[in-house]
Amino acid sequence: MTTDQRISVRLHLTNVAGAGAIQLLQSLLPALELVSNYSVTHIFLPERGKLSTYRSTYSTTVSEIYHREMPNALSRMLECTLFSRRFDGCTPLLVLGDLPLRCQGPQTLFVQTPNLLKPLRQTYNLDGIKYFISRALFRLSMQRVHAFIVQTEVMRKELERTYPGIVGRVHVVAQPVPVWLLHSGLNRQGRIKAASSNLNLFYPAAGYPHKNHKLLSQLDSNVSWPVEKLLLTLDASCHPAPKLRWIHCIGFLNPQKMIETYAEVDALLFLSKDESYGFPLIEAMFVGLPIVCSDLPYARTLCGDDAIYFHPDRPDSLLQALMTLKSRLDNGWWPNWQERLACLPKNWDEVAHKMLEIACHLK
């Protein structure tokens, strides 16, 4: 198929700066460009973060960095409203940064954050006000979006509950693990250390409030926890519970270090209270690790009955879950995630094709 015969599409990711979203797009962007019957003509990039240096392998694709002259929050608000005319055009625009643009032309929005959902109660701290404004911006321009893409059925239902005006326009497109793990060949089938030893756990998450590291600060240091080591991807200065010597902050890990850590630990511990997807859960299932996680809909949707769950606000519930994990491992148990993984796409090419079909009104 020649360039003239391919369907043109533009990509907008000027505000993608979070660790999880960057990781996702590092796998998705190359796949979007390689879908054979589509042509990415323009990519609007952020001015900071790893994606700012992304360049297309095609000489015909224009990569443009969106520069911000004002504080990010104010600049983002103006970009989505008064300054959005620069994104006008007949070529379909796939927006990969959660908020719709008040521009003219066919627009599809990929929503990756749960912060746009209606909270159980409004909070009036800085984050609460920021998310309130984000929801207002979403409502302001949501009718300009012909389709929305989310990662799970739970997220679809919650988004439609929060914004009834978009019912029927929300599509679910799940994703596989990142490319760096997809081709790693890692396949865990049991513990590395002796079955009777205490647990080696891993929680890869940035220090956002919803990641719930504060639960660790509530743990009683006088209790005998069945844990030898819990690794957190936080800087040492952000240690949530310095009195607990078995908790170690090891900082941000690159892909190779992530693979090495997954190869050594006994299980993934996932404390998060709010996720649109939960990539570490997918990663742990892919490599074959046991999972101990918050008993919330996002986790139940991905892990089903095969994870070990705890109440995200109760240290005693976490203790019981970890005791359950140790008991199972001591008795030779190991999870089989094949049934859960069968529900996910096999590769990023499949994801990219589905997204472009939706963006170009073909699905």
Image (cartoon, rainbow, N blue to C red):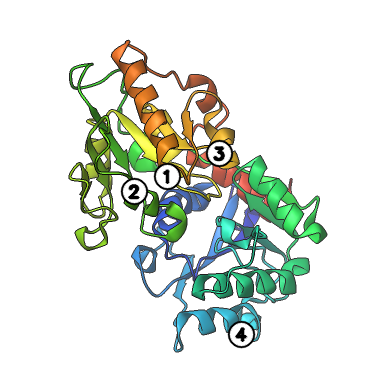
Asked whether the viewer can see residue 287, the reply is yes
Question: Closer to the N terminus: mark 3 or mark 4?
Answer: 4
Foreground mark, 3 or 2?
2
Which residue is denoted by mark 4 in the rendering? 83
* 46, above or below 278, in the image: below
Foreground mark, 2 or 1?
2
Task: Kindly give the residue lying farthest to the top in the view shown.
Answer: 331
Which residue is denoted by mark 2 in the rendering? 216
Q: Amino acid at mark 2?
A: Leu
Query: Marks 4 and 2, Cα distance to the nearest angstrom?
Result: 43 Å
Tally of numbered discs: 4
* 229, above or below 47, in the image: above
Picture disc at residue 350: 3
Left-right relation of 44 to 184 = right
- Regarding mark 1 in the picture, which secondary structure is present there? loop
Left-right relation of 166 to 186 = right
Which residue is denoted by mark 1 in the rendering? 271
Mark 2–mark 1 contact, CB under 8 Å? yes
In the foreground, 159 or 243: 243
In the foreground, 350 or 221: 221
Query: Marks 3 and 4, Cα distance to the nearest angstrom?
Result: 34 Å
* 175, above or below 17, in the image: above
In the foreground, 35 or 271: 271
Query: Marks 3 and 1, Cα distance to the nearest angstrom?
Result: 30 Å
**CA neighbours of label 3 inside 10 A, class few (<14), some (14 to 19), many (20+):** some
